[in-house]
Image (cartoon, coloured by chain):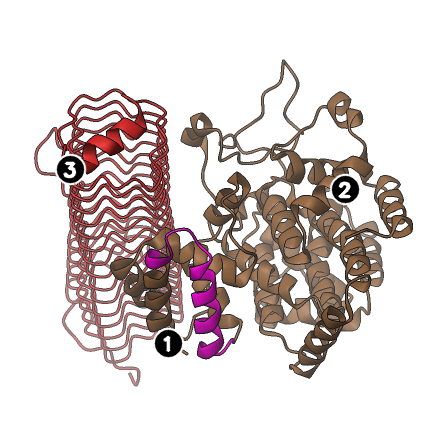
Chain colours: A brown, B red
Amino acid sequence: MQLSTDIFNEVVYYLDHHKESLRIKKLIFCICKKYWENDLTILNNVSLTELVQELIKLKPSNDHLSFSVYKLVKTLNRSTVYDPLARVIIEQINRLYNSQLSQASNNEQEEDTQLITNQLKSSSLHPNYQLIIEQVVANLANHQEEGRIKKLIFAASKNHWENNINLINEYGLKNLILDLRNTHANQASLRESFNHIVNNINKKNLYSGLANLIVNQIEMLYDTEVDYEENNKLETNIIETQIIHLDKSQINSPEIPQTYSLKQQGGRNQEFATSIIDLEKPQYLNQIKLPVPPLVEPQPKPYNYFELRLEIMQYTNPLRAKILLFSLLFQPWDYRAQDWTTLKGYTLEDLLDQLIQSRRSIKEIETKLYNIAKSQPDVESNLQTANVIIQAIGQIL
Amino acid sequence: MKPKELIECYSNGETQFSGLKMPGANLSSADLIGIVLNEADLHGSNLIFAYLNRANLAQANLVATDLSGANLSQADLTGADLRSAVLHGIILQGAILQETDLTLAILIDANLIGADLRGSDLSGANLTGACLRGANMRQEKKNFNTNLQAANLFKADLAGANMKGVDLARANLSGANLKEANLRNADLRKVDLSNANLTGAILSEANLTGAKLTGAALNKANLVRTNLMQTELAGVNFTEAIMTHANLNAANLTRANLSLTRINNADFTRANLSGAILKEAELIEVFFAKANLSGADLREANLTRADLMSANLSNANLSGAIMPDGRVYNTRR
């Protein structure tokens, strides 16, 4: 499908001239090349145009792009800096997907229209929004500097400084955050409030950094709703999946923890470089503390997921089950190396949960799974797997 | 021998291939059920979706092989070398993995139900989402040490698994299912057990120094003589657990629920129990030196001969509790 060159050029221009264009380029580079590059000579050797073209080829839909971008950002040790950039990239590249769609056939357009209508019917209190609020509260409450953070948030909300932490706790961090969200119509006004407070206290530098952190977190509450209105339903689903694999330690400290894999190059000072966990380099895994979920109180699921997993594990091949579920939820499986890595990023439980949350009927699941099974090599084994999945899921739905 | 020849020989009825050297082979989806490949060298091979049920792979070199989705149920992998192998979604149900080297292996969503992992080395392995129900990992003799140091067992299913004496130091067990698992005498220092389900689990004499159990469920767990020094236990549910002689020195038990527990003779020196619920708990001869019990709910608790001398009991609710001197605490004095 031909991209509208005008929109493409606009998007590339925007990203290239963004205040944080270098970081944006690094993100896109990493998604395309599958490793993190800090070397400017190498980065300057490849144009953003090429990278964006490659990106669209690799990530043909917004679901894939969002998943990859957020997954990457969560593994960075300065994810608060890269979080807003992730949104910028997704927003811009989404324009390219949309321009592709608008050139598509009439049938496809009708489908899109249907999707939008369904989303508008749903309640505005999207369950994922709740999850994100919990996430934001947990991130801030579990931060090393939680005392100072609470004082800042209280001050921004109540317009006076309070040193008594017990008093602040009585209000409840979640309430204070929601209050801020509700009284500030947009991120700019929120930032302004915090700036105002920081300017009027001593230890400005310390609090300024924390204020930044807080605003970056609370900003997520604004974007969720905006994304929802822009009918980006699946993005929030993907965020839900991402949160489960979020590395809390990275949110807490801007320094590189000793344990992360560094892409060593010469004698460069790695201290402020951003690094990622590279699953393809096993020799570093000794030092790596693999991602852990940050949620102190995970969203309880209405079904027993261990029993569901056991149902499937005991009676069929877990990898086949994952491939079938992946094909049903995202895109047909084509055994490319890239897909194996993506698949390792989802556990069987993640995929089952996504399927259940997608609210498809058992009939639809059945039909689709059988069709996917028939298109795989070794049809017989795949049909057996499809059967087991349907039996297991059927008990829940 | 080339992979094609192997498959041909096998389909002609030949199964004995001990010591075969075929590194880097492509045997994806191959049917090799019951094949004998002990001491074979297959390192770097592609065995994705291969059928190796009941195969003999003892002492085989399987370093960096890709066994994703392969079926090795009841296979014998005693002493095999599987370092850095990819076992994503593999079936190892009932397999023998005694003294197998699985360091840094990827076992995401692996089926290890009832597998024998005694003496195997899984240090640094990734077992996210793996199912190890009923797996046997217990340490039997000095040299038979099952090593799971720094392993990633995020959301792994270990219900009923036997992990007596296993080394799990620094392992990630957050969100894991350890219902009725046996972790007696296990090394759980600095383990992350946040949100894990340890209902009815056996942790007696285990060492959990510095472990994190935030959000975990320990109802009816057995923690007799367990070392819980400096553990993070805020809000943890211990209802009906047995914790006699446990060491809870400097543990954080803020708002923990210890109702109906038996904690006789335990050591709570410097422990933080503010806001904790100890209703009807049995706390006979418990040592509370410098413990913080402010706002704790000790209604009807039994504190006979407990040492509360230097404990902080401000705002604690002691109504109906049996005090150290044997008398019942009466609010209306």
Q: Chain of mark 1?
A: A
Same subunit under labels 2 and 1? yes
- Against B170, residue B236 (above or below) is below
Magenta stretch prevailing secondary structure: helix
Is residue A106 toward the left or the right of residue B142 in the image?
right
Q: Which residue is mark 2?
A: A52
Which of the two discs, 2 and 1, labels the residue nearer the N terminus?
2
Is residue B333 toward the left or the right of residue A46 in the image?
left
Q: Nearer the viewer, residue B267 or A353?
A: A353
Q: Nearer the viewer, residue A110 or B9?
A: B9
Q: What range is drawn magenta here?
A: A360-381
Residue A64 horizontal/vertical position (percent): 62, 53
Residue A244 horizontal/vertical position (percent): 50, 56
Q: Which residue is mark 1?
A: A394
Q: Which residue is mark 3?
A: B76
Instruction: Calculate the distance from the C-alpha at mark 2 to the C-alpha at mark 1.
Output: 42 Å
Is residue B304 toward the left or the right of residue A156 in the image?
left
Instruction: Calculate the distance from the C-alpha at mark 2 to the C-alpha at mark 3.
Output: 49 Å
Q: Chain of mark 2?
A: A
